[in-house]
Image (cartoon, helix red, strand yellow):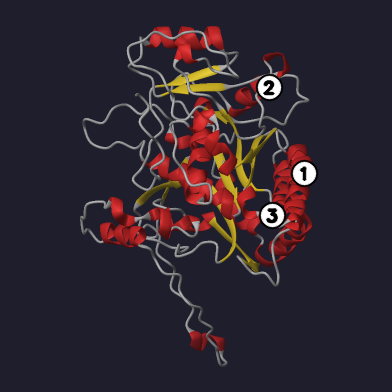
Amino acid sequence: MHEVLTIQLGQVANFVGTQFWNAQNEYFEYGDQAAEPEFNHDILYRAGTNQRGIETYTPRALIYDLKGGFGSLKKYNKLFEQESETNNDSWGEKVEEYKTTQYPKNRFQQHLDKMDEGIEEPIEKELDLDDSVKVWSDFNSTYYHPNTFNQINSYQMGNSIQPFDTYNTGCQAYDENEKETDSFDETFRFFTEECDQLQGFQIMTSVHDGFGGFTCGLLENIRDEYPKASILTYGISNIQQSSTQRNIQRRNLNMTMSAASLSEYSSLYVPIQLPDAADLNRPWTRYLSYQPHLLYQTSAIVAAAIESASIPWRLKKRTALMSEVIGAVNWQGNHNIASLGTCFPLDIVQGKQYTSVDRNLPIEAGRFSTIKNFTVDDAKKEDEIFGESTVLRGTPDIGSRTNRDKFIEDTFERLSGADAPYKQRYSFPTLTRSVFA
């Protein structure tokens, strides 16, 4: 089935990953009238059974975060019940209990709980996720397998006394975490060994803090275990979290060390910076309205780009392997650091034929909005592009599919087309202005 294991590490990366999985939920259609799916869900999802023998279908994913980073999300959920705890009497001695304050659920999570109980209520736009989202689980709407979650117990999110804020701290934390939990053997192998034809790994990791070093330790183990597998790594940084000059220097050092080490173990490494306040006055945001200080909003923009970039190896028909997509970008084999850009939303007037489009500075005549590059500020000249893979999606009604396919073949070196637009679930922030004046 050419399965892919997705691994997310760190609060910022998990914001992006949560947006990614929430969008996947929208591609599932049920009933006799459901259309044939355009995507092969088995690539990202795994089938299984729970303790009651009920079939489950959950993301093939590993999620790492610090203590406190999971918010109200529990290891066990509606699909998977927690096994009976050992009776305290069996210990043969006194047992002391330590309790911590439970993270409160926001109105969105309370609404999902009511849906689980069979209480149907209309979704309120006034749920105000912009103000209530503090951690990524606040807007999560996906059921995961219990083995998905990996908490790093030695560090607490937001702890200024023992901060998780340097690359070297992350390297040390990975070694300590493996000694304590043996998560690589217990959870990583749980997902990989059940695959028929594992083709690779999709990694989303924070790199401005300690998670760059933590991820380096993990990727080193993965590369030893799967020397020929494709590893596509997105190194995500949030410059909004750096206030003082010292923090900025530390962040830049973390990002540099992460790029050097993660690119060594990755088939393709893609550095990403979340949109910031400076982007608000740039052409690519003319149809977007977002608040740069809200991770809930900026992560949604990046997630849309990553999700779209994964389309070629998720298609049910005309599919490509992850290795083929990476090969189109790094065809020489020695350029394994790439950039990611997006045109979101895609600005094309319905009913018009495709025109030739400059890949770096899209022209108004083609009704394309300017592309946002999350890796570099300035558009590269065409002669500096060594290889590329581009996706055009959400355009089934513009001209014919034959015209679309010819357009992408003539304009881009490697481009995949998909009818499905990017699915914006009710948990997705309101970002877009009117596209057509």
The three-letter code of the residue at mark 2 reads Lys
The span from disc 2 to disc 1 (Cα, nearest Å) is: 21 Å
Q: Secondary structure at mark 1?
A: helix
10 Å crowding of disc 2: few (<14), some (14-19), many (20+)? few
Residue 339, image x, y percentages? 65, 30
129 on left or right of 413: left
232 on left or right of 407: right
Residue 49, image x, y percentages? 40, 52
Q: Earlier in the sequence, mark 2 or mark 1?
A: 1
363 on left or right of 177: left
The span from disc 2 to disc 3 (Cα, nearest Å) is: 28 Å
Q: Which one is nearer the viewer's eye here, 420 or 248?
A: 248
Q: Secondary structure at mark 2?
A: loop
Q: Secondary structure at mark 3?
A: loop
Residue at mark 1: 256
In the rendered image, the residue lying farthest to the bottom is 94
Q: Is residue 242 above or below residue 420?
A: below
164 on left or right of 151: right
Residue at mark 3: 209
Q: Earlier in the sequence, mark 2 or mark 3?
A: 3
Could you say which quadrant of the image residue 400 lies in? top left
Q: Is residue 26 visible?
A: yes
Q: Which mark is residue 380?
A: 2
